[in-house]
Image (cartoon, rainbow, N blue to C red):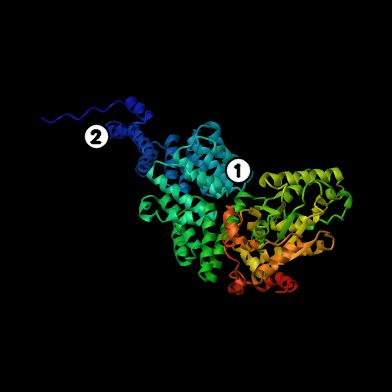
């Protein structure tokens, strides 16, 4: 006698089981219902959701497509289809069904979360931000939502808001996967110590444990902890991640970065090519990889291929900046002061207080200022800090009500000058605990356009102007993926970069006649040719005693941890001539239009 099939539970029982997380039972019951000829719509809807909750989106996808085709007026089906596509990292494809769900009246937080993911992948960051804010407002308990919000804020270059949100997330209970996602976002924000904390926390899930180790390797490499990075990397193998596309992508990025660090540039090039052939839902990450790929090509001696990769990267960057900052012009807040007249030297404003006026290190970006900073920081009487916009903040406060900065400075009273100094040194003290005991080194290259305006606030400071061959500087700027969005426009081509170089140095030269501060012009090539001689001259200028231990400044830099400028790798190596004359390999790209901006400065600086 044939045994009768088990009965099909009621839909009410199935819904209750799904609510209790008993997805395996729901899947079994849905199969029985299909065999028994039960109405397919409710059971296939239950099956699709159960598959999604079981983290089987590939199997859930055809179920959602069937539901949308058979009940096209149901917004939940379209919302679920869009979110399923997002889980499969097909965010751009998800946009249309999610928009349809919204038009049909869907309002649940998951819909807005999916729309935020899809718009972010499509580069429509402002729409993404609005939808993730709606999702958070409707369900503030879901930690996935602020994690996506942090990624969107970073992509929009809204760094103060991003930092505040990152601090909030670090204090919030997170799942293992969320904690690792946060680690990668902290890494992207250059908050490396905090990223290391997230990656170092024990993880039970095997795949997540591998992802955490991959993130830790990249964080160690970025903070020059190479021995630890290599030890961790040696235990990671591609076979362990090949089943998981996102994990494999992170693994290949780690391998490429470590290959670059070992100077195995051919291997790095192949790895970057593998990574870039895969689709990326995160356009900002994809952009960074394009610049890293160009760097690998450059190191392989393939100048034309590197230039082609850079042109593609800059075009991508402009698209992203145009979407995120549609009103942005070809300038930055720093460059906005180029046309400001220099206020006259006014001893009446020179406040006597307990603060030691800083040593300002200025110059065009990529002129060797980070290497110079490490040398200065090695002296026991000096202390440096990562590039900070503290002088920019002084200018901004003076211009708080939209007043002309030059007029505000000319009308400054001694009390206001004292207040401006206090604000600056309070910010310095926030990043340097021993600022009151040692003289601060404020290294921010483009302070060279602000410093002439503010010399009355820091009359006892000394200035070091870093100079390097203009063509090497312009090429290096063009090859960097600078975080500041306006730099993306300023350094978009070799010619636009050379034009800005010309403008900045023309401004500096015009202001030099009114600059009353002591200035030492510091040529990078001279330091390479005679490290000890130039180092001694530097400390003579600063009226500081010489110590032979200062010559070990690159070794000391290894112990500093995070160096957030692009030259973090080079400044921990012995001083060498590898980057001198780098532009010669790209000479054909330095057109007459480019050289018209640079040739006068080459002659002026003796190149």
Locate residue 524, reporting x and y percent.
Answer: 67, 67
In the rendered image, the quadrant that contains the C terminus is bottom right
Going 67% across and 58% down the picture, which residue do you hit? 373
Which residue position holds label 2?
35
Q: Nearer the viewer, residue 343 or 112?
A: 343
Which residue position holds label 1?
163
**Is residue 306 rendered to the left or right of residue 396?**
left
**Is residue 514 rendered to the left or right of residue 528?**
right
The residue furthest left is: 1
Q: Is residue 287 visible?
A: no
Q: Quadrant of residue 24?
A: top left
Going 87% across and 47% down the picture, which residue do you hit? 411
Residue at disc 1, secondary structure = helix
Q: Is residue 430 above or below residue 288?
A: above
Locate residue 372, reporting x and y percent.
Answer: 67, 61
Q: Is residue 498 above or below residue 94?
A: below
């Amino acid at each position: 006698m044939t045994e009768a099939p088990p009965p099909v539970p009621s839909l009410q029982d199935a819904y209750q089981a799904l609510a209790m997380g008993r997805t395996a039972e729901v899947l079994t019951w849905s199969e029985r219902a299909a065999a028994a000829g039960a109405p397919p719509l409710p059971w296939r809807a239950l099956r699709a959701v159960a598959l999604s909750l079981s983290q089987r989106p590939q199997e859930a996808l055809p179920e959602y497509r069937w539901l949308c085709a058979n009940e096209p007026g149901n917004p939940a089906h379209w919302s679920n289809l869009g979110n399923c596509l997002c889980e499969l990292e097909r965010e751009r494809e998800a946009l249309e069904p999610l928009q349809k769900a919204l038009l049909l009246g869907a309002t649940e937080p998951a819909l807005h979360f999916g729309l935020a993911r899809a718009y972010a992948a499509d580069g429509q960051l402002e729409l993404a931000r609005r939808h993730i804010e709606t999702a958070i407002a409707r369900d503030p308990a879901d930690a996935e939502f602020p994690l996506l919000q942090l990624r969107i804020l970073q992509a929009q270059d809204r760094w103060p808001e991003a930092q505040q949100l990152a601090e909030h997330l670090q204090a919030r209970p997170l799942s293992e996967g969320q904690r690792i996602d946060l680690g990668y976002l902290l890494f992207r924000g250059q908050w490396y110590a905090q990223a290391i904390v997230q990656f170092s926390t024990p993880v039970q899930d095997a795949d997540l444990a591998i992802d955490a180790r991959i993130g830790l390797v990249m964080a160690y490499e970025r903070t020059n902890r190479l021995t630890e990075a290599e030890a961790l990397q040696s235990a990671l193998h591609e076979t362990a991640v090949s089943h998981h596309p996102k994990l494999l992508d992170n693994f290949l990025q780690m391998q490429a970065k470590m290959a670059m660090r070992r100077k195995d540039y051919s291997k790095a090039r192949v790895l970057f090519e593998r990574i870039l052939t895969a689709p990326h839902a995160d356009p900002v990450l994809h952009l960074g990889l394009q610049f890293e790929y160009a760097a690998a090509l450059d190191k392989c001696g393939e100048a034309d291929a590197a230039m082609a990769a850079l042109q593609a990267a800059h075009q991508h960057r402009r698209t992203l900046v145009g979407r995120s900052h549609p009103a942005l012009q070809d300038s930055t807040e720093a460059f906005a002061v180029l046309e400001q007249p220099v206020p006259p030297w006014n001893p009446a404003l020179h406040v006597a207080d307990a603060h030691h006026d800083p040593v300002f290190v200025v110059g065009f970006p990529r002129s060797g200022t980070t290497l110079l900073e490490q040398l200065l920081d090695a002296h026991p009487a000096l202390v440096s800090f990562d590039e900070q916009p503290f002088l920019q903040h002084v200018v901004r406060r003076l211009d708080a009500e939209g007043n002309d900065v030059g007029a505000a400075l000319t009308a400054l009273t001694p009390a206001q000058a004292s207040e401006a100094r206090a604000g600056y040194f309070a910010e310095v003290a926030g990043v340097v605990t021993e600022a009151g005991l040692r003289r601060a080194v404020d290294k921010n290259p483009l302070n060279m356009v602000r410093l002439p305006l503010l010399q009355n606030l820091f009359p006892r400071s000394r200035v070091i102007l870093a100079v390097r061959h203009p063509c090497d500087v312009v090429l290096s700027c063009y090859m960097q993926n600078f975080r500041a969005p306006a730099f993306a426009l300023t350094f978009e081509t070799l010619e636009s970069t050379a034009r800005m170089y010309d403008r900045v140095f023309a401004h500096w030269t015009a202001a030099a006649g009114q600059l009353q501060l002591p200035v030492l012009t510091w040529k990078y090539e001279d330091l390479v040719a005679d490290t000890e001689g130039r180092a001694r001259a530097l400390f003579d200028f600063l009226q500081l005693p010489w110590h032979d231990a200062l010559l070990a400044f690159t070794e000391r830099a290894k112990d500093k941890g995070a160096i957030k400028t692009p030259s973090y790798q080079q400044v921990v190596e012995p001083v060498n001539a590898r980057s001198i004359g780098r532009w010669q390999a790209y000479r054909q790209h330095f057109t007459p239009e480019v050289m018209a901006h640079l040739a006068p400065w080459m002659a002026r600086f003796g190149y």
